[in-house]
Image (spheres, rainbow, N blue to C red):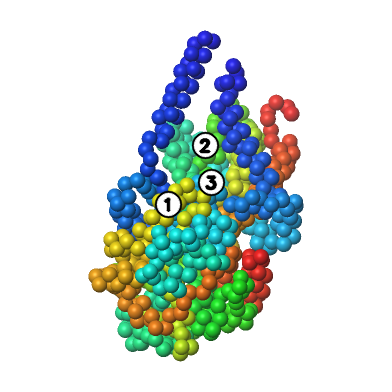
Amino acid sequence: MKAHKTVGFMLCTVLAASACGSGSGSDRAEIRFIWWGNDDRAKVTNEAVRLFESRNPDVKVSTSFQNFQNYFEKLSTEIAGGNAPDVIQMDYRYLNEYAGRNVLLDLTPYVGKQIRTADWNQGFVGSGKLNGKQVALPLAQNATTIVYDPKLFAAAGVAEPKIGWTWADYREIAGKIQASTGGKIAGSTDFGGTEDVFETWLRQRGKALYDNGKLGYTKDDLKAFWQLSKDFRDAGATTPAELVTTLNAGAEQTPLGKKLSASEHSYDSLYSGYNAVRPDELKLGPYPSDNKETLGSYRKPSQLISASARTKNKYAAVKLIDFLLNDPDAGKILGANRGLPANLKIREAVAQNLSGANKVVFEYEKSVDAKLGDAPAAPPKGDGAIYKLMQRKHEEVVFGKKTIDQALDEFWRDAEEALK
Amino acid sequence: MPYLFLGPWLLGAIGLTVAPMVVSLYLSFTDYDLFNEPKWVGLDNYARLFGDDPRYLHSVGVTLRYVAWSVPLKLVLALAVALLLNSLRGKGQAFFRSAFYAPSLLGASVGLALAWRAIFDTWVDTPDHALVTIVLLAAWQFGAPMVIFLAGLQQIPRDLLDAAAVDGAGWWRRLWSITLPMLSPVLFFNVVLETIHAFQAFTQAFVVSGGRGGPADSTLFYTLYLYERGFTEFRMGYASAMAWVLLVAIALITAVLFRTSRYWVFYGDGR
């Protein structure tokens, strides 16, 4: 009995001592920064963070990253567990989801001061604002695009995408490509389930995804869009049904990445991903549009950066945000990895010295810039669910489980539910 | 003093199991978005589950179909392989036992599910076949029940089987009249365990469908839908209600299995 007590006492002492040992020893502020992306992005981001640390010896930054699919699930769990990261890479689609729940720090008092925006397009600064509060700042700009394989276009003897081409042109061209490969390679990737494509198409018709938190389009609009996608299928100009589910995966898993399609709707900021699986084989072109005035594409914040409302080191978090956005050396390291840098001076500097994927992205943005619109307000809470809903309902149509009208009714009911 | 030694386990059981369960029961009566204070809504979540959520009922259907296919298939495979190994006494039995068990060791691993996804590429992407691939993946991991069956088979007294053989009973007859009855407690154990596991299946479906339960919701398992509601739509109260319905359903099904066991499980002690 006595021996047990002694051992127990010793154990307790050891535990207590080690608990003390891990206590704070320095005055360095510690912050945590997380983002989504791939190894490529991790390399440049970590390099920039190390430079920040060497310039600010009083701040220690720990970093981690996820792929996009799991990122927001991990983030929400961490925040709910009271373990929120201090600096958070944000997506336009989720801005309201998080800011609307008071999770993000209001950066308004710092903008124009600790966070410099003098060299920015002020409209672009505004894309990080919700209800007058600056809850995020855009990290970089991207736009929707058609990624395509020029060799297949040439082999079929059809013209490459250029401003002024229409959806009917696209269907015809894609059909010819598909026929020229004997049906082995589709002319286009089925786009009917992708909300980003639907948004661009809507904007060409003068509408928007959302209008004051409500759906900004009618059932007839979506019906026409799904009909358009069906026309492509009927014309033998797009991918077969079993490839429809691969669209939300990384570039290496999309039909274009797997050489099963000749062209695909995407974002220019994803080009480096495509380029990694099909080096120097693909090009970027403008969306087809039936509207002479606009392409429907807009200057979208490809990613944004926010701070947690519960951070204990506001000062250090704000400093890191400013550094990543505005420091010329950080800009040089980060390049166009996340799209065109938001700070125009840095964008110019990066443009001076372009190569590889960065060059393709910059040239594409330059070629369409005159036709790009400003970003609409961030989508409301529930858009994340609607995004998946559209994919799902379109799949049911493609696989012949539902007619367009049935899918439309169900979509409408669930979408309105998601926005409540 | 005994409580001191029980302490670590007790703390774990209360802190990591009982307390979270109580909290989730409370949350199931609230509207909780993970970040802000839960709001009490009474039975709303439960009412919506059954009255106003066709996707929920669909996920129940998918899960029931999965359980109904994967459990019998897996157990038949496990039993067949166990019988085969049992007849191998001494002749490399240990090696084959390990070899057949290997897939189950890798069972919950993400890598394996990814490989499966790659192998059944187009099947996984068609609604009519996607669930079949996941059932096959589950059935292939029959190692755990197989090892338990094998242990059970080795407990059956040889003289019973020998006596029957002498009396002219063939292989099928011995299987049906001696092996299966003698094995029934083990079979019962495996049925209960595998049924519970099947209801909770998550990893394979999550990985194979890329986390979406697709294509066209054909692999929307109960747990997958729960996860989506809770962690991507921030409806944690609703997800908690789903978890409790699942818990109660599994408890009921297990109770029914126990009830029926008196008719087909033979314990050899005259009960």
Which residue is rendered at x = 55% and y = 27% of the image?
B8
Which residue is rendered at x = 32% and y = 61% of the image?
A327
Location of residue A216 (image quadrant): bottom right
Which quadrant of the figure contains the C terminus of chain A? bottom right
Residue receiving disc 3: A82
Which residue is rendered at x = 42% and y = 33% of the image?
A23
- Residue A184 vs residue A228: left or right? left
Q: Which of marks 1 and 3 is in front?
A: 1
Residue B22 seen in render: yes
| Residues at marks 2 and 3, CA–CA distance in whole angstroms | 43 Å
Q: Position of residue A180 (x, y in %)?
A: 37, 83
Which quadrant of the figure contains the N terminus of chain A? top right
Q: Are marks 2 and 3 in contact (CB under 8 Å)?
A: no
Secondary structure under the numbered disc 1 in the rendered image: helix
Please state which amino acid type lies under the numbered disc 3: Gly
Residue receiving disc 1: A315
Residue receiving disc 2: B147
Which residue is rendered at x = 43% and y = 72% of the image?
A122
Would you place residue B87 above or below residue A12 in this image? Answer: below
Instruction: Name the foreground residue: A239 vs A288.
Output: A288
